[in-house]
Amino acid sequence: MNIFETDDNSTPLTEEEKMQLKAKWITTRAELNEIETKGIIEAEIWLLKNQKDILNENFIKLLHKKMFGDIWLWAGKYRTTERNIGVAPYEIQPKLRILLDDVRFWIKYHTYPEKEIAIRFHHRLVQIHPFPNGNGRISRLMADLIMRMLDKKELNWENKNLTEISELRKKYIIALQAADRGNYELLLKFIED
């Protein structure tokens, strides 16, 4: 089985990016998912001691590196190639800065309810797709960090393995696609189910 096999809604890695896998002992997709999950848990532990200003570009890059740095050489670095999703590589940095400014504005002026701010941030970060992989996972974690920053309960991503090809993942992708068209209702419903 190809450990890099993806569904139509996943971000495929380039051959060069695949070669940057640090953990050469991995031979199955399940092993890759397991070690990436371990990295995410370690990043969440790191966050307990190091959560400062989360709404800045350096923090997002550092968090991605903490999540995937033991697995991928490109962890914490913006992608340099076009993808089936996301902005052009040269647009990543300016679009991310605009997003971070937007979120600060939404929070300051109570533009949306807290959950919607977190969901809109999550969706836009996925749309930008700054990294070769792990964009959905870092976007969900960042949405939870925004909720924590606002002294609110984290979003309901628990027990939702969205990396595995499943009916749940399909529902999530449909909700993201609706958000692409400006309709956030399905994504808000997804986190509440």
Image (cartoon, rainbow, N blue to C red):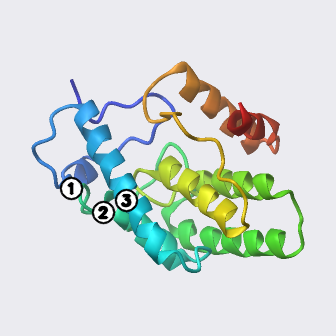
Q: Earlier in the sequence, mark 1 or mark 3?
A: 1
Q: Name the kind of residue labelled 1 in the image.
A: Gln
Q: From the image, which quarter does the C terminus lie in?
A: top right
* Residue 67 tag number: 3
Q: Position of residue 15 (x, y in %)?
A: 24, 46
58, above or below 26, in the image: below
User: Image check: 192 left or right of 157?
Assistant: right
Q: Are marks 1 and 2 in contact (CB under 8 Å)?
A: yes
Front one among 82 and 93: 93
Tell me the crowding category of disc 3: few under 14, some 14 to 19, or many 20 or more residues within 10 angstroms, Cα based. many
* Residue 20 tag number: 1
**Residue 79, visible in the rendered structure:** no
Q: Are marks 1 and 3 in contact (CB under 8 Å)?
A: no
Tell me the crowding category of disc 1: few under 14, some 14 to 19, or many 20 or more residues within 10 angstroms, Cα based. some
Q: Residue at x 77, y 52 (%)?
A: 115
Q: Position of residue 179 (x, y in %)?
A: 75, 42
Quick one: SS at disc 3?
A: helix
Q: Name the kind of residue labelled 2 in the image.
A: Trp
Q: Name the kind of residue labelled 3 in the image.
A: Met
59, above or below 92, in the image: below
Q: Earlier in the sequence, mark 2 or mark 3?
A: 3
- Eye-nearest disc, 2 or 3: 3
**Residue 121, visible in the rendered structure:** yes
25, above or below 29, in the image: below
Q: Position of residue 174 (x, y in %)?
A: 67, 30
Task: Please name the residue that numbered disc 2 is placed on.
Answer: 74
Quick one: SS at disc 2?
A: loop
Front one among 135 and 30: 30
CA gap between label 2 and label 3 equals 12 Å
Quick one: SS at disc 1?
A: loop
